[in-house]
Amino acid sequence: MLEGLRIIEIEGLGPAPFAAMLLADLGADVIVVHRKNGPPAPGMPERSLIDRGKRSIELDLKSADDTAVLKSLVRKSEALIEGFRPGVMERLGLGPDDLSQVNPDLVYGRMTGWGQTGPRAQTAGHDLNYVSLSGAAWYASNQGEPPFTPPTLVGDIGGGALYLVTGVLSGVMAARAGRGGTVVDAAIVDGSAHMMNLLMALAQTGGLSMTRGRSLLDGPHWSRCYACADGGYISVQCLEPKFYAEFLARLDLAEDADFKPQFDATQWPRQTALLAGIFARHPRAHWEQVFAGSDACVAPALDPRQSMSEPHMAARGVWQTIDGVLQAAAAPRFSTEPSSGPHAIPARGEHSQSILDWLENGADE
């Protein structure tokens, strides 16, 4: 869908390269600038999954010659993505003002945790810090437990990478409409706070409490995961009364007085304890059979390898193993475009010479 869009990515950590991978998944020509002779980022492999579908060139951005190469790439591209602390690219002479002189229509995508401005802008942080400050981690765990979100998903990916992608594509549309380039300030604290607006809408009708465990989605016995006899887990979230009725019917609890009040918050702790005892009697597979094909809003909580073989996930081909690497297929899907498997993962600098040749020849393609 994004064929014809060329984006330069400056090698970084976490959300910025993920955003570039998503754009490459959707057909953009993403050229990732890896550090020349540099090792992969800490904890990352030599061939990183999040580089799939990209072309790789190695450059030393402290070298005048290599900086000139980057500027040549910028001249032929519509967007650039970087994920450093504010001021790093400016010190390299590659900030937005510098590159706008090379390409006035450039969309300059900046990915940070705290944003380009504000008291914390120059301080270090990680995913959990950003979503904690923004309020997005507040409802992430059961009452009485410290807030804890799935690592990187809510902050780096949800509030970071996906907002960066949205910003870059919005900027490209504006530039193509003749409005010139722009700088996208994608901050994880901004994006993760923005994602809270769905919950804040619940607050308008009393469905969201500032006290953890008392809100419509973080306190009820019908909105949590339960441990099964075999150590597996089952998720339950039957919000609507008709789905709650189906849930109780499947458990033969339709006439049980203990479970009649669905929305009485004073009953939730006791009802939760009762359900915990029920689910602990049998293994997860048993409960999957009990709720199979129903509208009870119950599903197993699986790890990625278990998810790969689950019938629904397998039918959609969501998880795939390519060259020994387990990975999820591109999303979303389009009715007019054929589904394609994950693209190849390049070696660092694999396309350096071909990109240099392309620049030297002045080709448009």
Image (cartoon, rainbow, N blue to C red):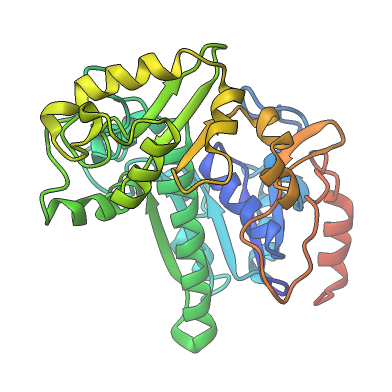
Residue 351 percent across, percent down from the top left: 85, 50
Front-lying residue, 314 or 74: 314
Front-lying residue, 295 or 339: 295
Q: Answer whether residue 152 is visible to the viewer in this image.
A: yes
Q: Is residue 334 above or below residue 151?
A: below
Front-lying residue, 154 or 58: 154
Residue 254 percent across, percent down from the top left: 32, 36
Quadrant location, the C terminus: bottom right
Q: Residue 251 lies in what quarter of the image? A: top left
Q: What residue is rendered at 75% in x and 34% in y?
A: 326
Name the outermost residue toward the front: 255
Please state if 157 lies on the left or on the right of 249 as rendered. Answer: right
Residue 178 percent across, percent down from the top left: 49, 88
Quadrant location, the N terminus: bottom right
Please state if 316 lies on the left or on the right of 205 as rendered. Answer: right
Please state if 268 lies on the left or on the right of 337 as rendered. Answer: left
